[in-house]
Image (cartoon, rainbow, N blue to C red):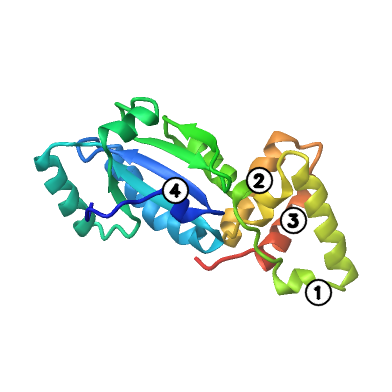
Amino acid sequence: MDDKVITLSQFADKAVLLVFWSIEDVVSIGILPYCDEILYNKYHRRDLEVIGIQIDMEEEEKEKTFSFIKANQIKIPIAQATRQLIKEYGNINTTPIMILIDQNGFIKEIYEKFNYEIIAQMEDNLLSLLKPLPPPPGVATLTDPELLRVKKITEIKCARCHYLDRVLLRTKTHEEWKRTVLRMREKQTDWISEGEAQEITNYLSQFYSRSQ
């Protein structure tokens, strides 16, 4: 939006999320702050770049866009789409559309509808691409037999339905982990006992937690 050119080659070896949006679309103006405040803040240090692409062409819409960016303190780069760019990405004429591009420049996912499940799936797909975090110091140096036992249970039980890194690359509060493990148990009560659910929750809260 400041007349500079943004190219994907600027972000070599990084995952890139392109967010096509319109200042005239109510869903777009809700998605953009989420991508800026949540996704970018959480994952930029792990080599995620987020680029908002405004598809509106009229000068009045551009002025509204500048006001929106300023009022919402949007930090991610916002590009003004050209007709050629819109054509190259499939003649985009609805918004929002998000395109996830991997570190090699290949399109991995295209998201055109948005609800809680899709947003969660998108974040999972992001996690599978991003640079992994080192294990928490406490986990890396575990020697206590009881904690090692619970660590093994956690890895076995969680890996049945998910890639393990999709679980262990997250940080949640104790209550969030409790709800997550409860959902896992409700799906397969014969796989995770009530006692194991409590142990897993406590383990994840101890080593993969964040404050309220």
The secondary structure type at the circle numbered 1 is loop
Which percent across, then down, holds residue 62? 15, 45
Left or right, 114 with reference to 157:
left
Asked if residue 39 can be seen in this view, the reply is no
- Residue type at mark 4? Leu
Q: Are marks 4 and 2 in contact (CB under 8 Å)?
A: no
The secondary structure type at the circle numbered 2 is helix
Q: Earlier in the sequence, mark 2 or mark 3?
A: 2
Residue 8 badge: 4
Q: Residue 183: which quarter of the image?
A: top right
- Residue type at mark 1? Thr
- Give the labeled residue for mark 2: 182
Q: Earlier in the sequence, mark 3 or mark 1?
A: 1
- Give the labeled residue for mark 1: 141
Q: Do the residues labelled 3 and 1 touch (CB within 8 Å)?
A: no
Number of residues whose C-alpha sits closer than 10 Å to that of mark 3, classed few (under 14), some (14–19) or many (20 or more): many
Residue 200 badge: 3
Q: At 12% across and 48% down in the image, what residue appears?
A: 63
Number of residues whose C-alpha sits closer than 10 Å to that of mark 4, classed few (under 14), some (14–19) or many (20 or more): few
Q: Do the residues labelled 4 and 3 touch (CB within 8 Å)?
A: no
Which percent across, then down, holds residue 85? 33, 35
Q: Nearer the viewer, mark 4 or mark 2?
A: 4
Instruction: Residue lying at the far left in this picture: please name it.
Output: 60
Q: At 87% across and 61% down in the image, what residue appears?
A: 149
- Residue type at mark 2? Leu
Left or right, 56 with reference to 114:
left
Q: Which of marks 2 and 1 is nearer the N terminus?
A: 1
Asked if residue 58 can be seen in this view, the reply is yes
Q: Residue 159: which quarter of the image?
A: top right
Q: At 79% across and 52% down in the image, what residue appears?
A: 155
Q: Nearer the viewer, mark 2 or mark 1?
A: 1
Which percent across, then down, holds residue 156? 82, 48
